[in-house]
């Protein structure tokens, strides 16, 4: 099987590609524009494989997307390319509209034309897998508001109510993907996943930011009182789930993916501080670096996924608990500080751009 993965140089896309190359005999074509969030060093361990190819292409560039489809003739597309950082979407929504909505539309049209040109089994077995977020559902009652908050979970039937420009752009793309199935018969799969954490996460997101700031003795900024609840999933568990969905999922279906690991942001930060204290002990507790800052506008208070369907239909369950996953993650950052500094200070991007000239 040959899979085209968009956004394969990003955090989750690179985990998907590493998983496929290391654990299957499938071939992968990685289509990525290489924005600030894309980093080919995340694929250094597998990029020598004869089953891996890279195409630096923007999903908004129809001519180039058509060329890649004609040239590589994939059996399935896993679409992860997106602008993904909520804070950036608040400061500048335009890129989010362009990539997440227009780019997905463009990819759908190119995929439809390509799929319609196929014949026989190749056409019947083709899949377009759209990777999305639980943030499209808006937020759930918080335990501070409702005593039985734990009874409320996002299911595949939950109505969409996105709060941020990021989640609204992802919701729009989900609607487009489902419309392309209903109207044109394109065999699509949609997955909506909770917050991921793990290796190769760009250091602007909560978990890596806290680890790196703590190591440098910088303040650990936590929004509001840190009471927001997220359902944390280790990125390699997500990669395993996505591969199951694209190979075994039923076209037209949506699968929610989550770790049943509901944690307040402040609990996550405390866990990171305590593991660092154990692995890199210092006199002053890392927790003393925590500082509460003004909350993000429109900040959702709680997300939590009901992952019953993917467990029952496809037999997927996460392998990591939050405790094991966060320990592995902290250890990975300690072992890979060089990677972090290179993506943070832009030297990776400068070398890449220099190499292209
Ligand atoms: P990321 O920001 O780490 O990576 C995004 C990748 O897409 C980068 O490699 C970037 O270069 C590429 N890209 C951006 N614009 C592009 C364009 N126009 N054309 C081609 N490539 C482009 O994101 P991530 O955290 O790996 O998320 C991947 C997907 O999973 C996104 O669709 C996101 O909405 C979804 N998701 C993320 C999470 C999470 O916790 N990170 C949770 C659920 C769903």
Image: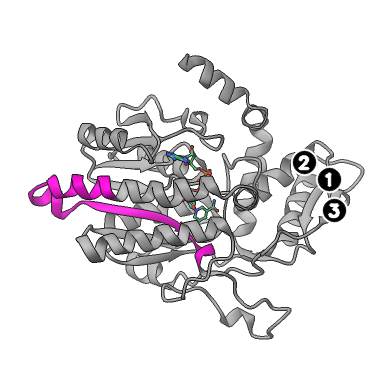
Q: Secondary structure at mark 1?
A: loop
Report the label total.
3
The residue labelled by disc 2 is 213
Numbered range of the magenta stretch: 109-136
User: Badge 2: few (under 14), some or many (20 or more) residues near its Cα, within 10 Å?
Assistant: some
Mark 1 and mark 2 in contact (Cβ < 8 Å)? yes
Q: Name the residue furthest left.
A: 120
Picture quadrant of residue 312: bottom left
* Residue at (62, 22) in percent of width and height: 347
Q: Which mark is residue 291?
A: 3
How many C-alpha atoms fall within 10 Å of the one at disc 3: few (<14), some, or many (≥20)?
A: some
Among the two numbered marks 2 and 3 on one chain, the one whose residue lies closer to the N terminus:
2
What x and y, as percent, mark residue 204? 66, 43
> Magenta segment: does it hold 130?
yes
| First of labels 2, 1 by sequence position | 2
Q: Which mark is residue 219?
A: 1
Distance between mark 2 and mark 1 Cα atoms: 7 Å
Tag 1 near tag 3, CB within 8 Å: yes
Q: Give me the residue at 52% from left, 43% from top.
A: 11
Q: Please report the residue visible at 39 percent of the width from the left and 46 percent of the height from the top.
A: 103
Which circle's residue, 1 or 3, is located before the other in the chain?
A: 1
């Amino acid at each position: 099987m040959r899979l085209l993965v968009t956004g394969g140089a990003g955090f989750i896309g690179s985990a998907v590609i590493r998983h496929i190359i290391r654990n299957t005999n499938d071939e992968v074509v990685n289509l990525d524009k290489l924005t600030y969030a894309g980093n080919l060093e995340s694929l250094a361990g597998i990029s020598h494989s004869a089953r891996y190819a890279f195409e630096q292409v923007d999903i908004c560039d129809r001519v180039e997307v058509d060329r890649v489809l004609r040239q590589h003739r994939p059996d399935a597309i896993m679409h992860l390319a997106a602008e993904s950082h909520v804070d950036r979407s608040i400061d500048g929504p335009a890129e989010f509209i362009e990539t997440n909505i227009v780019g997905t539309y463009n990819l759908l049209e190119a995929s439809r034309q390509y799929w319609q040109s196929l014949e026989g089994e190749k056409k019947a077995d083709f899949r377009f897998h759209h990777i999305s977020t639980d943030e499209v559902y808006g937020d759930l009652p918080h335990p501070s508001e409702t005593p039985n908050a734990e009874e409320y979970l996002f299911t595949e039937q939950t109505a969409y109510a996105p709060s941020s420009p990021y989640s609204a752009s992802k919701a729009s793309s989900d609607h487009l993907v489902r419309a392309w199935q209903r109207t044109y018969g394109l065999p699509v799969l949609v997955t909506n996943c909770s917050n991921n954490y793990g290796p190769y996460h760009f250091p602007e997101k909560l978990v890596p930011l806290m680890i790196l700031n703590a190591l440098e003795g910088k303040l650990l900024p936590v929004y509001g009182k840190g009471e927001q609840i997220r359902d944390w999933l280790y990125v390699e568990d997500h990669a395993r789930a996505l591969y199951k969905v694209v190979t075994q999922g039923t076209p037209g279906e949506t699968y929610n993916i989550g770790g049943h690991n509901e944690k307040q942001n402040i609990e996550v930060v405390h866990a990171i501080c305590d593991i660092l204290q154990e692995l890199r002990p210092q006199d002053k507790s890392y927790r003393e670096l925590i500082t509460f800052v003004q909350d993000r506008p429109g900040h959702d208070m709680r997300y939590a996924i009901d992952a019953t369907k993917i467990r029952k239909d496809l037999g997927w369950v996460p392998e990591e608990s939050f405790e094991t996953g966060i320990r592995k993650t902290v250890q990975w950052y300690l072992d890979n500080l060089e990677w972090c500094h290179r993506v943070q200070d832009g030297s990776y991007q400068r070398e890449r751009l220099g190499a292209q000239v």
